[in-house]
Amino acid sequence: MLLFWRHGYDATSISLLTEGMGIGAPSLYAAFGDKRALFKEALDRYMSSYGSFMVRSLQDEPDPRAAIENLLLGAAAMFTGGEHPPGCMIITAATNCGPDSAAVEKRLRTIRAGTVRAFEEKIASGGRSLPKGSSAHSLALFFSATLQGMSAQARDGATREELEAIVRAAVGAWPA
């Protein structure tokens, strides 16, 4: 998981995986079948561990604005945690995939689209109608883009404090 997270799907070679896992290629293929199947397992592990804060943030806080803010603050902490690569594996693992990795790219795109839907559902659940000219979908896209930008900033070395400043600015854009 950490290798895919650090290098991305295409740049993580079988030799890098076997070296990192301390096994030979035959053992990797016997255990996982192929690199794509191993990536799927790594992605599932990421979502159930490092990425799980996102689901909790949206479920645990009834107020949509506070839920999105908590999620983004959680992302600021997770994206800059020193015990793993910076940023978000789901956002960065297929940034530069070639045509042979279209299925991986599609899977990650589907997960990211699910995040937009989850944001939209949470925003729409607020009970209050949004001001004229704004929509739950537009806000969901905005906060998803904010999350993706925060991941890129973390990969470029942004600190938690800098990402939290982005969160404050983004949440300040919530329509009154």
Image (tube, helix red, strand yellow):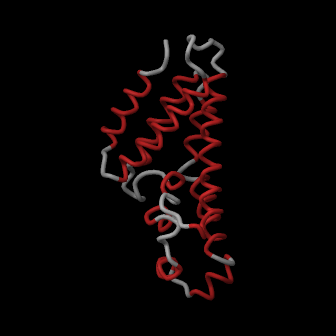
Give the answer, above or below, for where 169 lies relative to 41.
Answer: above
Tell me the quarter of the picture where residue 43 sits. Answer: bottom right
Look at 62% across and 12% down and name the residue there.
128
Q: Horizontal and vertical percent for residue 8?
A: 48, 64
Give the answer, above or below, for where 108 lies relative to 36.
Answer: above
Look at 50% across and 31% down and name the residue there.
142
Q: Horizontal and vertical percent for residue 27?
A: 62, 85
Q: Horizontal and vertical percent for residue 163?
A: 36, 39
Look at 60% across and 67% down and name the residue there.
101
Tell me the quarter of the picture where residue 120 sits. Answer: top right
Give the answer, above or below, for where 5 lies relative to 128.
Answer: below
Tell me the quarter of the picture where residue 31 sits. Answer: bottom right
Q: How many marks?
A: 0
Look at 57% across and 56% down and name the residue there.
46
- Comparing 56 with 135, the one in front is 135
Q: Is residue 120 left or right of residue 142?
A: right
Q: Horizontal and vertical percent for residue 77?
A: 41, 43
Q: Residue furthest front?
A: 99
